[in-house]
Amino acid sequence: MRVLSFIYFRIISNAYVPIVKNRHTVLNISYMARVQYGSIITSLKGNIAGQTFQDGNVSKVLRNKGYRKGSTSPRRQAQNTSLMRVTSSWRGLTQGDRDNWNESAINWPFKDKFGNTYYGTGYQKYVAESVALIGLGFPLIEEPDMPNSAQDPGTFSLALSAFTSFIVSWSGTTDTDMFLQIFASPPLSAGRNSNNVKKKLIKVFNMNGSSSYDFLSDYQAVYADAPGLSKVVVKLQIRTQQFPIVQFPFLGSAIVTP
């Protein structure tokens, strides 16, 4: 049987994107092309032969993925350690425990890179929930827990002041089993595209009875200071100890007030 393979998109323009290194502009480091999709293939994610598909401000782009030589970061090492701990724990479960996780997998939806919802296996749910519990500082569980909905935090807002305060606030009520995970980007130029910006975990905060949190010192511990008129992209999400699936996700940005 002969197999024919077609990719239904086209590159409509390309350009060298200048990158400034040590105050010198380099023109041939990042080669990027705009991509136009058709009616058959409407979106692509991931990497192919050193190229990566991304969303730009005004169009889809295909660019060099690049390679950065260096050792694994402490955060990635911690993630790998957590994953090895979880997979080892799964092997220690009884078959009955594993069957219970398989039956409960329908309660834990996942999303793929295109935002589509799907349901994994009991093992996938166990890994996801266990890693989340480790991230919150809680012990692993052997039996799957029941779904649990957090209180609605209402509307999130950001107020970032250089060297003074980085405040996130919410308008709703909170209880004891609500933990806010704060992720943030390094300081960016005010006009920087917020898409595809890398963010690091800044803080896990127990929201019980509070309406705001100042994460300036937590941010400085990761990135140092953010100067005035820079932009910071912030991702927020709530997890609970019982059934720690992501709830009430928020993604926004704010200009740092001088």
Image (cartoon, grey):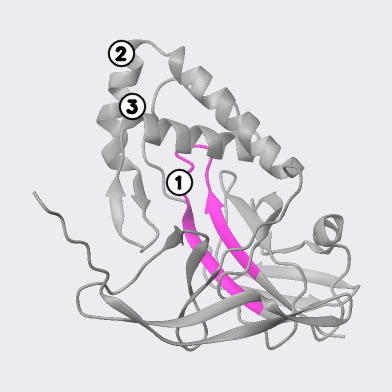
Q: Dot 3, how many residues are within 10 Å of its Cα: few (below 14), some (14-19), or many (20+)? A: many
Q: From the viewer's perspective, is residue 218 above or below residue 54?
A: above
- Label 2 close to label 3 by CB (< 8 Å): no
Residue 41 image point, x, y percent: 25, 72
Image quarter hosting the C terminus: bottom right
Give the magenta part as a residue range: 234-253
Q: Which residue matches tag 1?
A: 245
Helix, strand or loop at mark 3: helix
Q: Which residue matches tag 3?
A: 101
Residue 240 image point, x, y percent: 52, 44
Q: From the viewer's perspective, is residue 191 above or below residue 66?
A: below
Q: Dot 2, how many residues are within 10 Å of its Cα: few (below 14), some (14-19), or many (20+)? A: few
Residue at coordinates 60% horizontally, 64% vertically from top-left? 235
**What amino acid type is highlighted by mark number 2?**
Gly
Front residue (pair 52, 190): 52
Front residue (pair 71, 109): 71
Helix, strand or loop at mark 2: helix
Helix, strand or loop at mark 1: loop
Pick whichever of labels 2 and 1 is earlier in the sequence. 2
Q: Give the Cα separation between the discs numbered 2 and 1.
A: 23 Å
Pick whichever of labels 3 and 1 is earlier in the sequence. 3
Residue 152 image point, x, y percent: 48, 61
Q: Which residue matches tag 2?
A: 96
Q: From the viewer's perspective, is residue 212 above or below residue 242?
A: below
* Picture quadrant where residue 46 is located: bottom left
Q: Give the Cα separation between the discs numbered 2 and 3.
A: 9 Å
Front residue (pair 130, 205): 130
Q: Residue 41 has which mark?
A: none
**What amino acid type is highlighted by mark number 1?**
Ile
